[in-house]
Image (cartoon, rainbow, N blue to C red):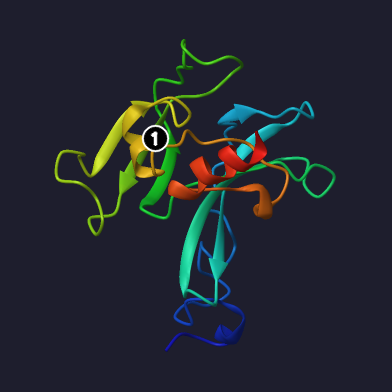
Amino acid sequence: FGGEGTANFPCFRCSAECPLAKKTNQDDTPISSCACGGSLLVRSNFSSSTNSTCLKLSCKNYPTCRNVVWIPNIISSIKPSQNEAFCEACEGSKRLVDIKIKRQGRPDYIPSMLECICLFCEPSVVELNGGNPLVVSATRKEVVRGANAQNAAGRAD
């Protein structure tokens, strides 16, 4: 196992000098604007119940603003595209990104890496999210994925 003080780190293999422990691996490049006037940044959460890390876009103004976009677990990384372009089809400033997709559960016709795409309107991302586009929600309870989204929409009418 890792060095001194590893009990505070989810992977139990690193030390306080690890870039992950220092959170220096997080890119503070805004991916989208937020309704509060802030910006949505890529963040990760470690879940001890599933022993995995999930990605999200959360507002820079947290905890004042709790807006969040939960990313499907099949997406393993999100980085802003190097060309610094924005989606022309979406409203607002949505930066194009490069994503890596996990092999397990990925349809063969979707490549393992998608470059220079919009998370909010790219058809492959919509498909990976159970046919639903990614949406901003205020809390985790409001997030509905996959077939449950259609059921929830039917109940709301």
Residue 113 located left or right of residue 57: left
Residue designated by label 1: 126
Q: Is residue 81 visible?
A: yes
Tell me where residue 84 appears, x and y as whole percent.
Answer: 46, 21
Q: Nearer the viewer, residue 137 or 36?
A: 137
Instruction: Residue at 48%, 82% (x, y): give it.
Output: 12
Residue 95 located left or right of residue 139: left
Query: In this view, which residue lies farthest toward the right?
Result: 64
Instruction: Residue at 68%, 31% (x, y): give it.
Output: 39
Instruction: Residue at 56%, 77% (x, y): give it.
Output: 9
Q: In the rendered view, would you say 33 is above or below 17?
A: above
Q: Nearer the viewer, residue 16 or 61?
A: 61
Mark 1: give few (<14), some (14-19) or many (20+) Cα within 10 Å: some
Which amino acid, by three-letter code, is at mark 1? Val
Q: In the rendered view, would you say 14 is above or below 63?
A: below
Instruction: Residue at 23%, 44% (x, y): give it.
Output: 112
Tell me where residue 53 appears, x and y as whole percent.
Answer: 48, 63
Q: Quadrant of the N terminus?
A: bottom left
Residue 83 located left or right of residue 155: left
